[in-house]
Image (cartoon, rainbow, N blue to C red):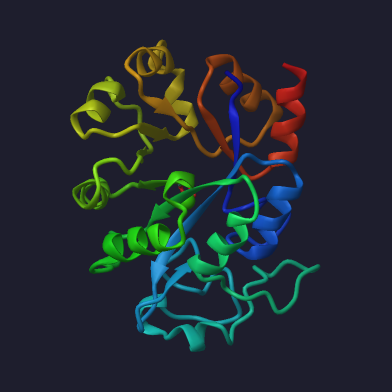
Amino acid sequence: MKTLIWAHRGASGYAPENTMEAFKLAHQQQADGIELDIHMTKDGHLVVAHDETIDRCSDGSGRIIDKTLKELLSYDFSNHLPNYKNVKIPTLEEVLHFVKGTDLTVDIEIKSGLVNYEGIEEKVTSLVSKMGMKKRVIYSSFNHYSLMLIKQIDKSIPIGLLYTEAMVDPHVYAAHLTAEAVHPFYYTLAVPDTVKKCRENGILVNPWTVNTAEHLGWMYKEGVNAVITNYPDTAFKIRRQM
Ligand code: G3P
Ligand code: CA
């Protein structure tokens, strides 16, 4: 089976990360899916951004949880890229609306931990369900407690366990948490047979963030389910050559 290409924060190697511009470009570059990060505003809206503050990616500063959606929309999220101007922070609903008109899948990373977004799991799953997008979404998080809350809401919802350091037998841990997938930092897959053991045990492997031709080729040879990359166009080109 061919490895899928998921655009990390959209086609973030070219366009401002986690914006509609980056998601639309990912679609143009023939990605199979997009990865995005969510936070909650002061007035309870789900917005798409990587950091818990807006300092790095916008012309503003401060925490998302301390601002209303209206306030957030007054900032420019061009990520200081010269060819972009007046880029708005997207709501998750806006992104899902776009995705609905495509065949993209969505990896929604819940960024709860540093800020505890009380009720975010309930909020995100009901939005996805209300929009009829349940079959198109996988949830991921470094906060595995948050993913367990997703499973408590509905055990049929797929989850991917994010991790950074090499883990012993990730397939065993994944099975223990009834997770469908693991989302490792790709270098941890240098431990022999990690992908093979996951595959044999029905656990999907979706590594991040795989950006160079060499490392993409390595992941394709390993036979991972999806690569999460900033450069969907490169990933597409290398996949075609395999
Ligand atoms: O989903 C993989 C990757 O996005 C996890 O790390 O920091 O880019 O959100 P980060
Ligand atoms: Ca992420």
Image: 240 above or below 9? above
- Occupied quadrant, residue 204: top left
- Whether 134 is drawn above or below 178: the answer is below
- Image coordinates of residue 195 in percent, x first then y, are 43, 18
- Which residue shows up at 42% across the image and 50% down it? 134
| 131 left or right, relative to 87 | left
Question: In the shown orientation, is residue 81 left or right of residue 211?
Answer: right
Residue 154 seen from this side: yes
Residue at horizontal 70%, vertical 63%? Answer: 21
The image quarter in which residue 188 lies: top left
Q: Is residue 114 above or below residue 72?
A: above
Could you tell me which residue is drawn at 75 percent across and 76 percent down? 85
Q: Quadrant of the N terminus?
A: top right
Examine the rendering and report whether any part of residue 114 can be seen.
no
Rendered residue at 25%/52% (across/down): 146
Q: Nearer the viewer, residue 84 or 190?
A: 84
Q: Position of residue 81 (x, y in %)?
A: 73, 66
Report x, y in % for residue 212.
Answer: 67, 32
Q: Position of residue 206 (x, y in %)?
A: 47, 32
185 to the left or right of 15: left
Q: Nearer the viewer, residue 60 or 29?
A: 29
Q: Quadrant of residue 191?
A: top left
Q: Quadrant of the C terminus?
A: top right
